[in-house]
């Protein structure tokens, strides 16, 4: 079968379509004929070698087949899995990756039947980024009238966070790069939208939120995080860190945490892979979408052979919403 792999860390061009043996489902696993694979930003960073700087992230053995998020049809089951799974359309996240392929193996424990009323692409967006968005919004404990600052607000997770924060009754300030993304954030309900690649963005936030913002949802890291931390409202401002798209870890002055009475907390895979918690977040994301309360934004779809182009689009920051590969 065809599988997109990289043999060395590097730019998008290191992604190659290789011919590899078909995988076999092991105990408790499903073999899925992939019809769509989601791309998440972490995969861009894994391929680029950015994650190597983080001691907590284990480097995958090379060559590595990327692809956590998978949608498709079950064609075979491993030991201990009932034959009734064969033929089912499922969506899931493979902890061992390999989704950028014609066939992928998914543990039955993380597979779920395609939810009614959602397309495969929407389900993929919700299974990955939707779970993160719901979890981050819960951790932030967004209250009506809070002012919420959302970074990368037109991205996969960010576009859902804008909607979740609006649903909670908050005033939303969206940060993104370029007019197209700012327009999308406004369309999703953001009350204000600023380009954080412009030097005066923090000042513009201060103009609309003179007392600061109650919540920062931080996925960029580096200077953006630092400036966003400085914008937190005194007494109970809350920042949730859930990504470092800039490749730079956020830096804060810990003294400011108690002097200003603010908090910084995190949300990452170690939290949401706890089975019951992750299951609840996923169910919530699907239910909210089914009820029309959130709408996953679908981005560009690339054929498997153009995985490098898809990764380049991410790196050039031209994508909005969920980016998908199809075999
Ligand atoms: N904690 C978790 O468990 C978890 C799980 C999934 C994803 N994440 C994180 O959540 C964030 C969003 O993920 P996503 O998959 O939905 O991606 P995404 O938001 O669709 O894409 C990443 C966005 O980050 C922004 N960005 C800011 N600085 C950047 C830089 N220096 N280089 C490239 N992009 C930059 C870009 O938007 P602008 O051009 O508008 O700035 C880009 O489109 C990422 O940081 C990701 O690592 C965390």
Image (cartoon, rainbow, N blue to C red):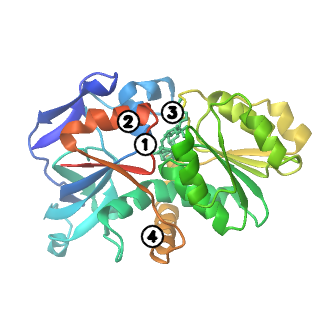
**Secondary structure of the residue carrying numbered label 1:** loop
To which residue does mark 4 refer? 286
To which residue does mark 2 refer? 313
Of callouts 4 and 3, the N-terminal one: 3
Of callouts 2 and 3, the N-terminal one: 3
Q: Nearer the viewer, mark 2 or mark 4?
A: 2
Residue 211: x %, y % from top left: 88, 48
Question: Which label was assigned to residue 56?
Answer: 3
Residue 174: x %, y % from top left: 65, 48
To which residue does mark 1 refer? 319
**Other residues around mark 2 within 10 Å, as few (<14) / some (14–19) / many (≥20):** some
Which residue is located at x 72 percent, y 53 percent?
A: 148
Q: Label 1 near label 2: C-beta < 8 Å?
A: yes
Q: Label 4 near label 1: C-beta < 8 Å?
A: no
**Other residues around mark 1 within 10 Å, as few (<14) / some (14–19) / many (≥20):** many
Of callouts 1 and 4, the N-terminal one: 4
Direction from residue 79 to residue 239 in the image, left or right: right
- As measured in the structure, the alpha-carbon distance from the residue carrying label 1 to the one carrying label 3 is 28 Å
Q: From where the camera sits, is residue 34 visible? A: yes
**Secondary structure of the residue carrying numbered label 3:** loop
Q: Label 3 near label 2: C-beta < 8 Å?
A: no
Direction from residue 142 to residue 300 in the image, left or right: left
Q: Nearer the viewer, mark 1 or mark 4?
A: 1
- In the rendered image of this protein, does residue 194 appear above or below residue 70? above
**Secondary structure of the residue carrying numbered label 2:** helix
User: Where does the N terminus fall, quadrant-wise?
Assistant: top left
């Amino acid at each position: 079968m065809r599988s997109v792999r990289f043999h060395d860390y590097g730019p998008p061009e290191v992604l190659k379509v290789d011919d590899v043996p078909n995988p076999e489902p092991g105990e408790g696993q499903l073999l899925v004929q992939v019809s769509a694979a989601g791309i998440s930003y972490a995969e861009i960073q894994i391929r680029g070698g950015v994650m190597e700087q983080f001691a907590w992230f284990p480097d995958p053995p090379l060559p590595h087949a990327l692809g956590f998020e998978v949608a498709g049809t079950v064609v075979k089951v491993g030991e201990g899995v009932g034959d009734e799974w064969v033929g089912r359309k499922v969506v899931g996240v493979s902890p061992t990756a390999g989704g950028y392929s014609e066939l992928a193996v998914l543990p039955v424990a993380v597979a779920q039947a395609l939810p009614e009323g959602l397309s495969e692409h929407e389900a993929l967006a919700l299974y990955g980024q939707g779970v993160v968005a719901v979890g981050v919004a819960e951790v932030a404990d967004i209250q009506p009238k809070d002012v919420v600052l959302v970074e990368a607000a037109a991205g996969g997770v960010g576009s859902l966070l804008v909607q979740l924060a609006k649903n909670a009754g908050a005033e939303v300030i969206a940060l993104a790069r370029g007019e197209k993304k700012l327009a999308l954030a406004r369309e999703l309900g953001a009350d204000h939208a600023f380009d954080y690649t412009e030097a005066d963005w923090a000042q513009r936030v201060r103009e609309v939120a003179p007392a600061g913002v109650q919540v920062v949802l931080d996925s960029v890291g580096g200077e953006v995080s630092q400036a966003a931390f400085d914008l937190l409202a005194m007494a109970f401002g809350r920042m949730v860190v859930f990504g470092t798209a800039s490749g730079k870890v956020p830096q804060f002055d810990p003294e400011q945490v108690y002097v200003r009475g603010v908090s910084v907390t995190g949300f990452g895979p170690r939290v949401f892979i706890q089975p019951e918690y992750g299951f609840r977040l996923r169910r919530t994301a699907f239910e909210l979408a089914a009820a029309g309360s959130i709408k996953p934004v679908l981005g560009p779809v690339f054929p498997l052979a153009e995985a490098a182009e898809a990764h380049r689009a991410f790196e050039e920051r031209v994508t909005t919403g969920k980016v998908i590969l199809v075999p």
